Image (spheres, grey):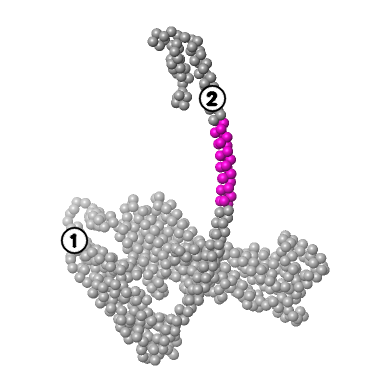
Amino acid sequence: MFELEPFVADEYIERLAWRTPGGGSRGGEAFDPKRLLEEFVNHIQELQVMDERIQRKVEKLEQQCQKEAKEFAKKVQELQKSNQVAFQHFQELDEHISYVATKVCHLGDQLEGVNTPRQRAVEAQKLMKYFNEFLDGELKSDVFTNSEKIKEAADIIQKLHLIAQELPFDRFSEVKSKIASKYHDLECQLIQEFTSAQRRGEISRMREVAAVLLHFKGYSHCVDVYIKQCQEGAFLRNDVFEDAAILCQRVNKQVGEVFSNPETVLAKLIQNIFEVKLQVFQILTLIRINENLYKLMEFNLGTDKQTFLSKLIKSIFISYLENYIEVEIGYLKSRSAMILQRYYDSKNHQKRSIGTGGIQDLKERIRQRTNLPLGPSIDTHGETFLSQEVVVNLLQETKQAFERCHRLSDPSDLPKNAFRIFSMLVEFLCTEHIDYALETGLAGIPSSDSKNANLYFLDVVHQANTIFHLFDKQFNDHLMPLISSSPKLSECLQKKKDIIEQMEVKLDMGIDRTLNCMIGQMKHILTAEQKKTDFKPEDENNVLIQYTNACVKVCGYVRKQVEKIRNSMDGKNVDTVLMELGVRFHRLIYEHLQQYSYSCMGGMLAICDVAEYRKCAKDFKIALVLQLFDTLHALCNLLVVAPDNLKQVCSGEQLANLDKNILHSFVQLRVDYRSARLARHFS
């Protein structure tokens, strides 16, 4: 009863009184207060006993709860200790995994470095064998005599053709002519085979032949043959537009199965249809419409004839204008893709995809943490894959698109349409051309320990900066007037900012790695040219040189790099990059000098070297760099100063603020450092 909710004391007493005999007037029974009092006293005693029992139970439960709380706290502490141990093991495992991953990458690179030359040697041997057959004038190999091996023959002749182009004409004119003739014959056979396969409808054979022809000069002719044949019998009705649409739908399903670049082929087909079929049809139609309209203008129409003519013309083209932007984007996309493809074809370059996933992601994470260019770099032979001609063509196409957009778009749709055109420019100019060149340039930067590396990434930087200026000019001159008073303005500005920031990150990364390579080249020069006897000559009285050969070569190399940086960059970027190079240059020379011990005359030569380095540092025109070399020059004086004057020199203006350990490290380089007199004076 006490556990029932809710408990009301008055009701409980009332029920107790009614249950007690004589406690009420139940059935005429007389009221007996003594009996009721006795019942209440007994019940109170029972309640007291119950209260004591419950209180003991509560105390017991509280003690049990405290005990369990202590056990739980102890268990939590033990779990925390176990968690710390597990976390420590996890950190050790993570470090071990990183170490193993680095070793695996290094081992993979070593295996690749061993296997690749071996494969190249085997391939070179085979090519030499086939080349000898052309020299002898008789093709005996089965690959050239068996018509079923035309694919293998095409691969070989294509490589031989590239090799033959590098040979001098006067000595190898005959063999060059034979290879060129075979190259042409195989090319014609492949195109004929492709034509026959297309007529038979053999898609797999067409795809196989097209893949072989991709590396031949006649690949574009193969595409032309395909476009010509697929149009045969396609335009038989009066509705040329319907025929063109049906043809493009049919070809669109097939072209992806045949060619590796279906977008380019389809764009070329559409361009051919437009230029050969639709353009002529449209011109004839417009001429007829115009002639009929002006004939009708001879009548008195009771209104402004010119306004009336404009309305009629607008009504004719209203259905085309409603879908104008889709046509514009499709045309601009095909034209831009064609411009880029022509450029890469002219370079005989197949665009590569940047590897992602698996080991590539692991390499990228390790490279970002360590700044090590894992894997062999790509040799691009100094090609930047950036073309101002391509950029101008893309910008010209976009400029014309902006002008058409201004004339043909509804005023309410103008900002939105202009933004779509701008997005196409960003895709093809910034992403497909500039960003691809930056990625390729980054992959082409050699490791910092490479010898005689071609550091052409600065050329990429120079051309990219020029293109950025052209891109920015078109943004301000042709896009801004179309969106300046619309919400699309902020969206365009943000898109432009994002794409430029992304490219600047890659430019900064490439410049940083290029500077590492420059320092690596200087380190190679110093290692190869600097001799220990330079600073500790055997005959102290017969030293004629003013500075060492290593110093001369390093300074010559540095001056060339400074000039290249100035020519490749503009504005504050020049000073920023030169300051970074200058600081690294100083660190290299500082650490290099720490490797030798110096006699008195050797110390004088070191001072002469540093004086030459300081003269070279003046070309940087950066105050911090010159100050660093001034301090280094002052430190080198510690190599030759008399022991009695050491303290005076160390307290001089340029050395007073330097850490004593730095000063001590230079004094220790003296061959007479261990003499008690020198140590006493320096201490």
**Residue 70 image position (x, y, % from top left):** 58, 40
Identify the residue at image location x=34%, y=57%: 405
Q: Which residue is mark 2?
A: 51
Find numbered disc 2 in the image and state the secondary structure of the residue it sits on: helix
Q: Quadrant of residue 385 in the image?
A: bottom left
> On the rendered image, what quadrant is the N terminus found in?
top left
Residue type (three-letter) at the residue carrying disc 1: Asn
Q: Which residue is mark 1?
A: 292
**Residue 221 image position (x, y, % from top left):** 31, 76
Residue 590 visible in this rendered orientation of the protein: yes
Evaluate if marks 1 and 2 touch, with contact meaning CB atoms under 8 Å apart.
no
Identify the residue at image location x=37%, y=84%: 180
**Residue 279 image position (x, y, % from top left):** 26, 66
On residue 643, the disc is none
Find numbered disc 1 in the image and state the secondary structure of the residue it sits on: helix
597 lies left or right of 428: right
> On the rendered image, what quadrant is the C terminus found in?
bottom right
**Residue 570 image position (x, y, % from top left):** 53, 64
Q: Quadrant of residue 94 in the image?
A: bottom right
Q: Nearer the viewer, residue 92 or 275?
A: 92
Q: Quadrant of residue 606 in the image?
A: bottom right
Q: Quick one: label 2, few (<14), some, or many (20+) residues within 10 Å?
A: few
Q: Nearer the viewer, residue 196 or 120?
A: 120
408 lies left or right of 300: right
Of the numbered discs 1 and 2, the one sitting upstream in the chain is: 2
Q: Vertical placement of 425 versus 304: above or below?
A: below
Q: Quick one: label 1, few (<14), some, or many (20+) residues within 10 Å?
A: few
Q: Is residue 16 magenta?
A: no
Q: Is the magenta region chiefly helix, strand or loop?
A: helix
Q: Which residues are magenta?
A: 58-84
558 lies left or right of 155: right
